[in-house]
Image: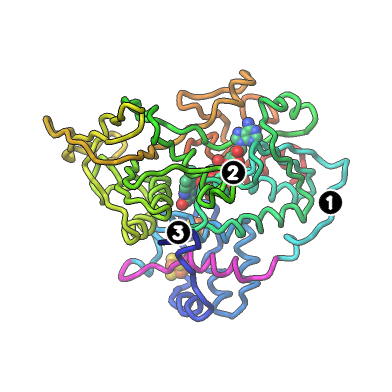
Amino acid sequence: MLDFNEVDKGFDIKKATEEAARCLNCKNAPCKGACPVSVLIPDFIQEIKNGNVDKAKEIIEETNSLGSVCGRVCPQEKQCQSVCVRGIKGEPIQIGQLERFVCDNGDNHPVRSASTPPKEGNLHVAIIGSGPAGLACAGELINNGVNVTIYEALHELGGVLSYGIPEFRLPKKIVQKEIKNLQNKSVRFITDVVVGKTITLQQLKEENDFVFIGTGAGLPLFLEISGEMLNGVYSSNEFLTRINLMHAGDFPNVDTPIKIGKKVAVIGGGNVAMDCARCAIRLGSDVALVYRRESTDLPARAEEVKHAVQEGMKVLELSIPQKIIGDENGKVIGLEVTKAVIGELDDKGRRSFNEIPNSAHVLDVDTVIIAIGQRPNPLLSKSDNSLEINEKGCIVTDKKGESVISSVYAGGDAVTGAATVILAMGAGRDAARAMLEKGRII
Ligand code: FAD
Ligand code: SF4
Ligand code: SF4
């Protein structure tokens, strides 16, 4: 049976040097322009060519404090690699792999390992949430001498990097290393604090010069079909949290169990759905992905789909879930789906689908995992109704990330809805810069 160890082993020095040698060092660097945090791609690749991996890492860290993470999970094929000149007539440079190699193997930049704590009289900032948005915000602030405290609701730090993305894609030691770097620089972390319950936003605002909200999008969406309350139905959040955060795969050596059947349907088509499918396969189940459009439309990273299929996931494309069927004890025994055909492009440019009449049939499954998306958790905004929230439950901010409450900033999934690690990081960093500007540090 497959284990939870990392699947993609990355580049060694030989492979990294060969790949770097293919880079044309383009003057206009389209790759850099397509990276949400503008990593100086040709420059760091040049340092690999020069044999100076430490310097390459220093260059990446000028704009990206989580290079080992992004190199692994960024949708590179839609970002930096999508415009690589080498891709016009062949394969684009594998920028993500090179970034991962450099950040895994380069030495720490001296600034990163500095441990001089900020002076008490300097600015104080409270950050709510320890996901990529909060961590990137903290990194930028601490490097500028700000006193930073991160409040995290869970007992572990890292947000989705810890409780969502599984070990076989992102080893937890990578995330812990990044957190340790921040701790070494005197960022304070306080876990098991739910802001809005344990303490209020108002309290944090009174005790600090600025507050940054990076609470993510942790509220799972459901299909609103019958049978979603049956035993054997999981939201992706519950399923992945049990496995990644509570290590339920090791039950009974740990406290949290996971009950999973032999035949699992995962509903959805994004990265979250792939992670659920690949975890379920590792727990010994047969897994079918139930998806409304065609396989070629799957929004998940191509790499993740490839791995999931290689590991045994079947894709039931053009299938629309209609109801989950239970037995007399309330346990899942099937999923009714109807077939679909692809229609015109919708207003978001995605291919629409139309249900085929009289095509209903029942899939023989005993577990259903719903992975159709998440929204921001309303807990904090409900506890403080002075925050402005849009119709999707996201916090409204201005261009600099400031909310309608003066000196309270927000960024990442809490503002955009479920998005990507790199976008959340970029938002955290930009909000930090706006705070530094407003606090007259830069
Ligand atoms: P989060 O990472 O969600 O962190 C928010 C943190 O805030 C959490 O730790 C939460 O516990 C804490 N929090 C919430 N409310 C409170 C409160 N009231 N008080 C205190 N703390 C609070 N993106 C990619 O780029 N590539 C991928 O391959 C990818 N795969 C994914 C797989 C899964 C399973 C999931 C769920 C997401 C994936 N994403 C991926 C998306 C990406 O992880 C998110 O966009 C990113 O983590 C958002 O960062 P964030 O800091 O805004 O929020
Ligand atoms: Fe590419 Fe992401 Fe790295 Fe930017 S952060 S260079 S988009 S892999
Ligand atoms: Fe190198 Fe491609 Fe960027 Fe050109 S576009 S500098 S070839 S990575």
Magenta stretch bounds: 88-108
Toward the left, the furthest residue is 358
Disc 1 on helix, strand or loop? Answer: loop
Q: Position of residue 51 (x, y in %)?
A: 59, 80
The three-letter amino acid code for the residue at tag 3 is Cys
Q: For residue 27, say whether it is visible.
A: no
Q: Which residue is mark 2?
A: 255
Disc 2 on helix, strand or loop? Answer: loop
Q: Looking at the image, which residue is at 35% across and 56% down?
A: 308
- Give the Cα distance between marks 1 and 2: 38 Å
Mark 3 or mark 2, which has the lower sequence index?
3
As drawn, is 240 to the left or to the right of 316?
right
Disc 2 residue lies near ligand 1 with CB under 8 A: no
Toward the top, the furthest residue is 385
Mark 1 or mark 2, which has the lower sequence index?
1
- Give the Cα distance between marks 3 and 2: 42 Å
Q: Which residue is mark 3?
A: 80
Q: Looking at the image, which residue is at 75% across and 29% down?
A: 204
Q: For residue 374, say whether it is visible.
A: yes
State which quarter of the image contains the N terminus. bottom left
- Looking at the rendered structure, which numbered label has been put on residue 117? 1
As drawn, is 82 to the left or to the right of 434?
left
Q: Nearer the viewer, residue 191 or 253?
A: 253
Q: Looking at the image, which residue is at 35% across and 32% down?
A: 331
Q: Position of residue 192 (x, y in %)?
A: 69, 37
Q: How many marks?
A: 3
1 or 3: mark nearer the eye = 1
